[in-house]
């Protein structure tokens, strides 16, 4: 499972530019025998025919990203939001890390930079290292001027990403874009597990575009794919089991199994389907956690609004929306076992 997650997380896939991820999924799912198609907005669909009601399993392809806001005459790139909300909150996580800017011909490397401590007092900025505005952080591409940046294929609006390798730390793994490539890995592994069998559900895997900009891809699913008996949305779930976090943030922890989310900032998930998954976990001795997130939303809320009873299954994740998101492989394996049970109940 580690190698699959590593492959997915290291692909570039900012909002609106998920093509590399979509190509990977189409090839892998077709190789497992799924009937693969693509919707008009770019969602990838993989049907695994079964003998029962239609079950959607869904995760999103896009990752956290910024956008080029301006390019200075001396070749530095200033940043703006690349997803819903201001996006400003991810800037502190980016500083002094490798950046990559997506262009029509590939990726251009740089560094998320700011004045260091030796010079910060000279700028009139905050001496404590705090980031007060978008202009406190920029991307240095090592290029001499604006003309060189434009010649590299970079323009206002170009997506800017973290560049980070995915690594193992014992049974943990860290990397960028685990939100929500871990969900895509689960769907891909599910397709492998169901290959050559006939599940008791007609399973439809759906990888959506632009979740981070407001569930854009999920908004058209009922229109494009018709009705579903039920859906399981897959996401990362914020885990606060590390120093400095209050007790209520520690309800979800790594290594205790996936978390079934009862509610978040956007919706209350279907209580009946959530109970079905909890009962399946109990019968199959699969560890699960309960969660309710106040500052969190997913494509699952959009599915609920389209009249599809939806449960939200999350993989507990530390340091979300950073270049070093962390999950536990045992939680991923348990989530996969629960999905297989849900498809064959």
Image (spheres, rainbow, N blue to C red):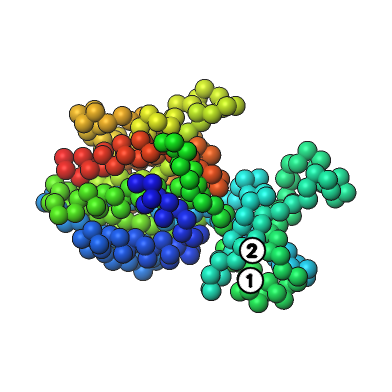
Q: Earlier in the sequence, mark 2 or mark 1?
A: 2
Tell me what residue is drawn at x 24 percent, y 28 percent.
285
The alpha-carbon separation of the residues under discs 2 and 1 comes to 7 Å
Q: Is residue 110 above or below residue 164?
A: below
Left or right: 285 in relation to 302: left
| Quarter of the image where one finds residue 117 | top right
- The furthest residue to the right: 122
Left or right: 316 in relation to 339: right
Q: Is residue 320 above or below residue 212?
A: above
- Name the spot of residue 320 as percent of width and height, x first: 52, 42
- Name the spot of residue 8 as percent of width and height, x first: 41, 55
Mark 2 and mark 1 in contact? Answer it, CB < 8 Å: yes
Q: Is residue 37 above or below residue 1?
A: below
Tell me what residue is drawn at x 68 percent, y 59 percent.
139
Is the residue marked by circle 1 packed among few (<14), some (14-19), or many (20+) residues within 10 Å?
Answer: some
Residue 12 visible in this rendered orientation of the protein: yes
What is the tally of numbered marks visible in this picture? Answer: 2
| Quarter of the image where one finds residue 161 | bottom right
| Residue at numbered disc 2 | 68
- Name the spot of residue 96 as percent of width and height, x first: 67, 50
- The label number, if any, that marks residue 155 in the structure image: 1
Label 2 sits on a secondary structure element that is strand
Instruction: Report the front residue among 283 and 192.
Output: 192
Left or right: 323 in relation to 56: right
Tell me what residue is drawn at x 44 percent, y 36 percent.
170
Residue 77 visible in this rendered orientation of the protein: no
- Name the spot of residue 114 as percent of width and height, x first: 74, 52
Instruction: Report the front residue among 300 and 234.
Output: 234
Label 1 sits on a secondary structure element that is loop
């Amino acid at each position: 499972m580690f190698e699959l997650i590593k492959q997915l997380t290291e692909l570039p896939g900012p909002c609106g530019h998920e093509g590399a991820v979509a190509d990977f999924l189409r090839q892998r799912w077709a190789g497992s025998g799924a009937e693969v198609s693509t919707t008009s907005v770019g969602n990838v669909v993989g049907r695994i025919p079964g003998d029962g009601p239609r079950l959607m399993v869904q995760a999103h392809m896009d990752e956290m990203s910024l956008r080029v806001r301006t390019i200075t005459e001396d070749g530095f790139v200033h940043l703006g939001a690349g997803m819903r909300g201001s996006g400003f909150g991810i800037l502190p996580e980016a500083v002094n890390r490798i950046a990559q800017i997506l262009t029509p011909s590939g990726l251009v490397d740089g560094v998320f930079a700011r004045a260091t401590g030796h010079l910060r007092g000279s700028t009139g900025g905050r001496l404590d290292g705090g980031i007060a505005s978008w202009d406190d952080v920029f991307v240095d591409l090592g290029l001499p001027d604006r003309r060189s940046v434009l010649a590299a294929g970079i323009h206002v609006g170009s997506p800017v990403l973290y560049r980070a390798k995915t690594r193992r730390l014992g049974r943990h793994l860290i990397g960028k874009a685990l939100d929500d490539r871990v969900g895509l890995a689960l769907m891909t592994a599910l397709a492998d597990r169901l290959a050559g069998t006939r599940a008791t559900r007609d399973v439809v895997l759906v990888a959506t575009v632009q979740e981070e900009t407001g569930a854009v891809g999920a908004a058209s699913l009922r229109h494009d794919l018709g009705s579903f008996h039920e859906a399981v949305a897959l996401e990362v779930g914020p885990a606060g089991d590390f120093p400095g976090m209050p007790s209520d943030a520690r309800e979800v922890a790594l290594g205790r199994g996936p978390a079934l989310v009862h509610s978040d900032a956007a919706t209350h998930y279907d209580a009946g389907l959530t109970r079905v998954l909890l009962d399946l976990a109990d019968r199959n001795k699969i560890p699960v956690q309960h969660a309710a997130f106040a500052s969190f939303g997913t494509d699952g809320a959009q599915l609920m609004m389209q009249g599809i009873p939806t449960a939200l299954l999350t993989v507990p994740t530390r340091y979300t929306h950073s270049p070093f998101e962390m999950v536990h492989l045992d939680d991923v394996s348990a989530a996969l076992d629960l999905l297989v049970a849900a498809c064959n109940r």
